Image (cartoon, grey):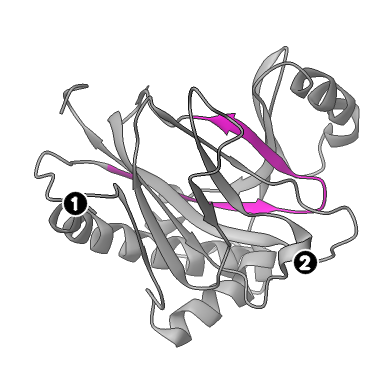
Amino acid sequence: FKEKKYISLNNFLHPTSATNLYKHFPHVTWKTKFITRFGEEHLPLNEYKDEFEEHIIKHGERNFTFHFDFFEPDRELMGRAEIKDPESPQSMADLFVSKLLLEIKKELQSFIPELTCINELEKVYIGCQRYKAGHFLKPHTDRGQGDYGWRRIAFSLHMTPDWEAEWGGQTIFTPRNNPNLVTRFVSPTFNTLHVFEVNDDERHYVVPISKYTKNARYAIHGWLHTKDENV
């Protein structure tokens, strides 16, 4: 990692855990996330989606934007003694995925500082993304300050088995000053963890998902942060 500022690890989760996560992903409470000229939007799945899709595409012609679904561990749900509707597949999926995500978060919090030799890494943000037909992420850097501090290390754990290359969804890395030069091409291989340094000299984007695929590209993603911008 020290030399390339990037590493990938196959079979990161136990095969049973990875398969169970994948089986639960379609049933969790997904929200749509996108940017238009009105700003960043987080909306319940399907609510206002058609209304804004044209604005998303128009905005993306000249500006940075993205369009995908996301899910974050529900701390409120995790703290409940009882689930309101224990028979609801959605409630059970939210609980199962949230619990497993928080376990993965703890593991990454101890594992990645050792892997990267950056001892100043502290808080971890973790969430899930779902890219369906037509979803995309334009070139950008993750560099910046969030609720947890300065983003220093990014990670992505791909969670869709048997993904076909023709469906899109690959993550492409390019130098900031040469967007046509591909320095890294990452396929969304099932249960493979990708860890990379966040910096201002590199951009990355997700190839749009083909309109004809019925599969979804699932991934667990996030960042490890530092207090100091220059660490």
Secondary structure of the residue carrying tag 2 is: loop
Q: Is residue 182 magenta?
A: no
Q: Is residue 129 magenta?
A: yes
Residue 182 appears in view: yes
Which is more N-terminal, label 2 or label 1? 1
Q: Name the residue under label 1.
A: 116
Secondary structure of the residue carrying tag 1 is: helix
Tag shown at residue 146: none
Name the image quarter holding residue 92. bottom right
Residue 86 appears in view: no
130 to 90, vertically: above or below: above
Q: What amino acid does circle 2 point to?
A: Asn
65 to 125, vertically: above or below: above
Query: Along the line of sight, which residue is nearer the eye, 50 or 4?
Result: 4
215 to 60, vertically: above or below: below
Query: Along the line of sight, which residue is nearer the eye, 124 or 100?
Result: 124
75 to 166, vertically: above or below: above
In the image, farthest residue toward the bottom: 16
Part of the protein shown in magenta: 124-140
Query: Along the line of sight, which residue is nearer the eye, 148 or 165?
Result: 165
